Amino acid sequence: MKKTLTYETYRDKVFGAWLGKSIAGTVGAPYEGRKELFHYEYDPKAIKEMLPNDDLELQVLWLEVMEKKGIYFNTDDLAEAFHNQCPYAPGEYGVFMKNFARGIHPPVSGAFNNRYYVNGMGCPIRAEIWACISPGNPELAAEFAAKDGIMDHEGDSVYTEQFWAAIESAAFFESDLPTLFEIGLAYLPKRTRIRQAVEDTFKWCESERDWVKVRERIIREYGHPDCTNLYQNTAFTLVALICGQGHFLDSTMIALNCGYDTDCSCATAGALLGIIQGAAYLKETYDFYDTSYVLGIDVTRSDNNLETLADDTCRVGLTMAMERNALVEFAGAPAFIPVPTERIHDLEYSVDYHGDPVIGLGESKRITLNLNKAYAQVPDMTFKAELEVPEGWISDWQPRTLRLDANGISVPITFTVPESLTLLQECNRMKLQLSGDGQSYAYEFGLNGAQVWKIYGPFWENAVSFRPTELGEWYSKQDLGFANPDHSVDAVRQYHLNAVVDSDKDYLADQPEYKLVNLREDLFSVSDFFGYQGPCVAYAERRLHCPEDREVHVMVGHTDGYRLWINDEEISASDERDWWTAENKHHRGIKLRKGENRIVLKCIRRGASAEYSLIFSEKGSCMPQQYDYGSYI
């Protein structure tokens, strides 16, 4: 049965979503990333000047995509806009940019080589647009949220965007928070960590009246050093909503005072309360006003007023109700010009990489290329199919005729990179050309070329410099039961049971043998190189091909000591142990020359593991979007 929503109420709630999002997000923005407990009180001066925020501006971009391409957009439509119109690229955004530029499409673009940022807040904060164009239809809102989230995330982050989209969609008709949360839980799969975090937060809020105590439990069980990690921040948002008891400012300030990703947690809480209560209530109760918004991306709107943004959003929602949202009807809707409703895609493409989207030197990679009709009304078609393959590669592909019917087509293809190849590019795009029945289509997809490294080692030293005769003499004088051990016992047992490394020694001076290793991601472990266990030094050497002289930013991630040389110049070193991130060390203004560049990373493993990453950044020291490089073999 359809639910009826007056247009006046619908518009007020959409306006409330954007107003609440902007105001609460601006309150939280100056404290983003700070992890301490705060005790701030609301100051109206905090919203005098709006700040650009990816929480809102990416949703304005999705709105533009729908205005241009209509309501039958697909994930690649969003991805192309994201890639082409967003000048920033921190964290998971940068990982997506790099993957998509290399022909790695969603959902792989959100999962591959995204170890540190995959559980970030980057997609849960983009849920409101899908709720606002799908009022009263949580399932449809969650479907759109998934199309969005898989661009730059996977798993729990995507589920969390669906969680909030479903809750906010239902909030157009339901105001009870426990009921809304129960609706949202349906989109968090059981036995996932985010489901457990949400359920634990509900339980702790029921048993503990002090939100500060609940915050402590959240950090104890779900805390993470990354300020944008979704587990703690999603829980903080829930604490703010539950303990704020529907009061906008109280909820916003609890979210702020929990710390960490404060612009996101504040903005999400504010948006949900804005939908429930509406813009008119927020303005009357809290003396709010249309604060407008500021964009930092390449999107042009008629103006920057939130009320206009609400009108434009409602236009899509009205169009959606005509075509795809059968659960709601609007009473008193004005005449409007719908956004496009034509189906703009006849075909759906996907690539099953059967693992990671990477091929290394001397390797073969089998993928499956899938083609399907985008909707049932697309007629059966016969195509002549051709595929462009990178120069020097070997493929079992042959030009062929493909018949597309309701069952779709799955075409297995095997690519081989011969060992005789002298240069393996990291970016390798294939282009599928289809022509026939008066139609032509093209689809590009990619395979990353592995980074080819020479690995030297392992190198290690004895723990002490006993000579065998001295060691035998020591044993003859000792009680083998070690009844009265002293420091010499420690030394001998270290000699027997352990090894040490000399971080200053040049182990390459003797020109040892090496082996070639294909590194498939930016993050690697010394244990990936060889089976030797124990403290050691390993050298990773790469001859990197650069197509032109460049000045780049270099980011080093590490958990143990290292030294890094580029073209025989030491540019980075550390003897510290650290929690691995993709950005432990940053170096600006590093020069790479056209052609060959010699990269040497000395990895020092003293404990059970040592992990490293080395990223050349195009746009900034915290933005891991890479240029295209290759490995000289």
Image (cartoon, rainbow, N blue to C red):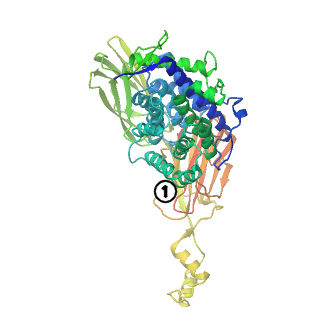
State whether residue 405 is above or below residue 484: above
Residue 341 image offset from top left, x and y in percent: 42, 14
Q: Nearer the viewer, residue 197 or 528?
A: 197
Residue indicated by mark 1: 527
The residue drawn where x is 53% and y is 71% is: 498
In the rendered image, which quarter contains the N terminus?
Answer: top left
**Element class at badge 1:** helix
State whether residue 100 is above or below residue 543: above
The residue drawn where x is 33% and y is 25% is: 372
Considering every residue shown, the one lying at the far front of the view is 285
Relative placement, left or right, of 49 versus 139 is: right
Question: Which quarter of the figure has residue 470?
Answer: bottom right
Q: Is residue 510 visible?
A: yes
Residue 631 image offset from top left, x and y in percent: 53, 40
Residue 575 image offset from top left, x and y in percent: 65, 58
> Looking at the picture, which amino acid does disc 1 mark?
Ser
CA neighbours of label 1 inside 10 A, class few (<14), some (14 to 19), many (20+): some
